[in-house]
Image: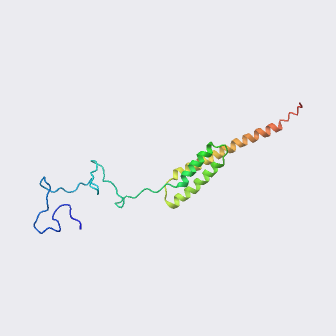
Amino acid sequence: MTTPPWGEQPDQPAGQQPPTSPYGQQQPPSPYSSPYGQQQPYGQPPLAQPGYGYTPPAPTNGMAIASLVVSIGGFFACCGLPSVVGAVLGHIARKQIRERGEQGEGMALAGIIVGWVAFGIFLLIAALYGAAIVAAVLADDSSTY
């Protein structure tokens, strides 16, 4: 059974006063006290406890993290295939985030952008190497040793 913070106690006979503090009057509880009796610093709201209106944040989508990591790794790798994998993971992660209400939308979008840009740079470099090889073959010098 709970007791009110001040006033008559339910299990006391009528007419008897509840025990008071040594300073004369019983004090009402502080609005800044936590359920565990610890005082909060002046001007700060009470601690939020699970079950008392506190909702934990949504988890971050793991595929969004993987997308960003693989895309950045593919950017520095010698071939562009990891970048494509990172971009595809980012697209899948964005779909999962919308469906599940998770966090990580920014990481998934960054993974998509970095992945496709890195793959585009890889294709540009591969095309330049291919053009250089074709130019070298067509420059038939036909000199003999």
Which of the two residues, 52 or 130, is positioned nearer the viewer here? 52
Question: Is there any visible trace of residue 108 in the rendered image?
Answer: no
* Residue visible at 60% across and 45% down in the picture: 73
* Side (left or right) of 116 relative to 12: right
Q: How many marks?
A: 0
Q: Position of residue 134 (x, y in %)?
A: 79, 40
Looking at the image, the residue that sits furthest to the top is: 145
Which residue shows up at 17% across the image and 68% down it? 11
Q: Residue at x 64, y 43 (%)?
A: 77
* Residue occupying the point 85% across, 35% down: 140
In this view, the residue in front, 39 or 122, is 39
Residue 106 in the image, given as x and y percentages of width and height? 52, 50
Task: Reply above or below: 83 against 51.
Answer: above
- Name the spot of residue 68 as percent of width and height, x first: 56, 49
Asked whether, in this view, residue 138 is left or right of residue 22, the answer is right
In the rendered image, the quadrant that contains the C terminus is top right
Quadrant placement of the N terminus: bottom left
Query: Please, which colouring scheme is shown?
Result: rainbow
* 51 shown above or below 72: below
Seen in the image, is 127 located left or right of residue 20? right
Outermost right residue? 144
- In this view of the protein, can residue 68 be seen by the observer? yes
The image shows residue 110 at horizontal and vertical percentages of 55, 48
Camera-side residue: 63 or 136? Answer: 63
